[in-house]
Amino acid sequence: MSNRFIAGVLLLLVPGLTAVELLRRPNANVEAGNAAMKAGNAQAALGFFEKAAQTGAIDHGVQLNMGLALSALGKHDEATQAFLQASGARDTALKASAFYNLGNGFFRGEKWDEAIEAYKRSLTLDPKNVNAKWNLEIALKKKVEKDKKDQDKKDQDKKDQDKKDQDKKDQDKKDQKDQDKKDDQKQDDQQKQDDQQKQNDQQKQNDQQKQDDQQKQDDQQKQDDQQKQDDQQQEQEQPQPQKQEGKSAQEQ
């Protein structure tokens, strides 16, 4: 949007200060406020309008003027409340002006749906308000732009979320694959360890068997040696037979 176009829009957004004649009442504070607004002193005008509003029941005309003064001071939220109060007027022209300025307040806040509704209600009451028609067209275009921007953002957010979800799935799949690989490796390592332990146990058992067999042989050899020794001892202890000397022929 060019600066020239923006300036044109802003001019239409504050017609209450130029194109719409301020509501006049036979009230000194209202007249003083109107004079201050025409002189460009919105702060002083607001003070007078606030005094006028304190005189009794709600005066919709005073509320409209207060809204214009607040808007000129940049107090748009407070101005919106004043215009809402003024929109309750029975007078058609006053009611139309209240909705028109309410639409301007929503326009400034980029609340396009609310601005469109306010301008439509103003035009229903005052179909000849060209400023309301112009601002309504702009608000409708802005709403289309905003809706498209919101939809684009929603689509992009969904796309980003889908990508994030897919990345998470891919990462989970990769993590699971890595974990399975680790588990398989751990299982293989455990199997190797078990096999090695079996081999060690078998070797130990074989060594023990050899040792036992050797011990048996040693024991048997020792037993045999002892038996031989006993046999020899026994033989030595047996009495020797007496030798007989031979007789001569004469003795025979």
Image (cartoon, helix red, strand yellow):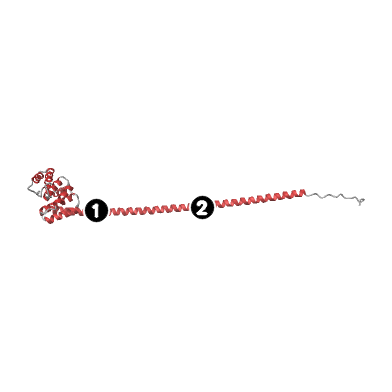
How packed mark 2 is, by other alpha carbons closer than 10 Å (few <14, some 14-19, many 20 or more), is few
Q: Is residue 124 left or right of residue 244?
A: left
Measured from the top left, where is residue 92 in percent x and y?
Answer: 10, 54
Residue bearing the label numbered 2: 194
Relative depth, front residue between 76 and 228: 76
For the point 46% across and 52% down, the residue is 186
Q: Is tag 1's residue or tag 2's residue first in the polypeptide sequence?
A: 1
Q: Is residue 5 visible?
A: no
Measured from the top left, where is residue 97 in percent x and y?
Answer: 12, 52
Q: Which SS class for mark 2?
A: helix
Q: Which SS class for mark 1?
A: helix
Q: Is residue 178 left or right of residue 62?
A: right
Measured from the top left, where is residue 201 in percent x and y?
Answer: 55, 52
Q: Amino acid at mark 2?
A: Asp
The label on residue 150 is: 1
Query: Which residue ends up furthest to the right in the rendered image?
Result: 250
Q: Amino acid at mark 1?
A: Asp
For the point 31% across and 53% down, the residue is 161
Rendering quarter of residue 126: bottom left
How packed mark 1 is, by other alpha carbons closer than 10 Å (few <14, some 14-19, many 20 or more), is few
